[in-house]
Image (cartoon, grey):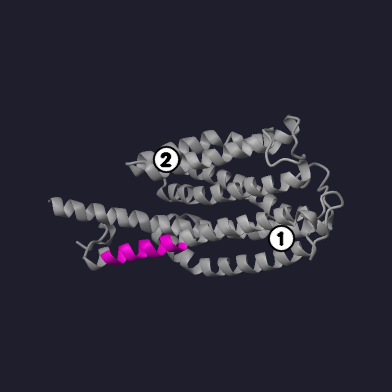
Amino acid sequence: MAVIDLANPTRFLRIVDRVLPWLAAATVLAFAFGLARAMHAPDDYQQGATVKIMFLHVPAAWLGMMGWGLMSLAALGTLVWRHPLADVAGKAAAPIGAAFTFICLVTGSLWGRPTWGTYWVWDARLTSVLVLFLLYLGVLALYWTAEDPGRGSRAAAILTLVGAVNIPIIKFSVDWWNTLHQPASILRMGGSAIDPAILWPLLIMAGAFTLLFFTLHLAAMRNEILRRRVRAMRLMQAQELGA
Amino acid sequence: MNLGPHADFIVAAYAVTVFAVAALVAWIILDHAAQRRILGDLEERGVTRRSQRKD
């Protein structure tokens, strides 16, 4: 089957119905394995057991940014090719990305208090992630409150592409400015600075969170396709009643 | 497992994450059930999409 065949919503729904249970099972298994490894990971020599918050905070941060990247690709599909499935993908990813960014902010704050002595500081990394969360809320407001869904989708796609500028700012904020947040310690030149006993559980948890993201995204896309069918049928019904 | 003097912060971080993920999962499952129910109701009343029509 060609990739282009996935662009047909009916065929897409059939594939999602088949794939989703396997993806959900893989997500549960990955979390069971990842959490077992995370709970048995050694304490950090400086931070002690609070390093366990990293197994939630870092994957949530990655997926908050990945969600916006995915939405940016979908926004291109909406604005350039006007493909309805691209719009469905963008709209379905927004609440999930917002939830992961929320988790990143809250767990980061709870990690910051014992390690830095404060829940919050207006440094470049923290502030740019807060901006990402507010951008997510802005996109959701456009999707959920627009009277004409087509106009709402186009406005959300434009905001998504404008907001994509924030992603490299988040990534490089710790290099460009003097921040309280630590510099990159995993994805950096010269390899990871984290001991393998902590790095491996982190990578497994990141894999589990990624599986969770795609499981939820496919399920939310399926819901959105069904919602559009409901809308189309109600419009047909209204037209028939008016005729 | 000893979570040390900052156990409250660790437990709170995991609790917030579980709550946020559970809320997201519940919302998606309930939304799916609602859309299926509405579609079923419309189909029962004989409403179809244009692409489903034979004539």
Q: Residues within 10 Å of mark 1 (few under 14, many from 20)?
A: many
Q: Give the image location of residue A221, x and y in percent.
A: 46, 56
Q: Is residue A182 left or right of residue A60?
A: right
Asked whether the viewer can see residue A2, the reply is: no
Q: Would residue A180 appear left or right of A229 to someone viewing this image?
A: right
Residue at image position (42%, 40%) is: A142
When the figure is inspected, residue A188 is found, relative to residue A233, above or below; the finding is: above
Eyeballing the image, is B29 above or below A51? below
Give the residue displayed 30% in from the left and 53% down from the top. A231
Where is residue B50, by image quadrant? bottom left
The front one of A23 and A58 is A58
Q: Which three-letter amino acid code belongs to the residue tagged 2?
A: Leu
Q: Measure the C-alpha gap from mark 2 to mark 1.
A: 35 Å
Label 2 neighbourhood size at 10 Å, few (<14), some (14-19), many (20+)? many
Q: Position of residue A180 (x, y in %)?
A: 75, 36
Q: Main secondary structure of the magenta part?
A: helix
In the picture as drawn, the residue positioned furthest to the top comes out as A177
Side (left or right) of A171 relative to A198: left
Name the subunit of mark 2.
A
Q: Chain of mark 1?
A: A
Residue type of the residue flagged with mark 1 = Ile
Question: In terms of depth relative to the viewer, which is nearer, A78 or A231?
Answer: A231
Q: Residue A134's spot in the image, x, y percent?
A: 54, 39
Instruction: Single out the mark in the foreground, 2 or 1.
Output: 2
Residue marked by disc 2: A142
Quarter of the image for residue A214 reads bottom right
Magenta part of the protein: which range? B29-41
Q: Is residue A57 magenta?
A: no
> Which numbered disc, 2 or 1, marks the residue that appears first in the sequence?
2
Residue B30 lies in the magenta stretch: yes
> Is residue A130 in view from this perspective?
yes
State the residue position of label 1: A204
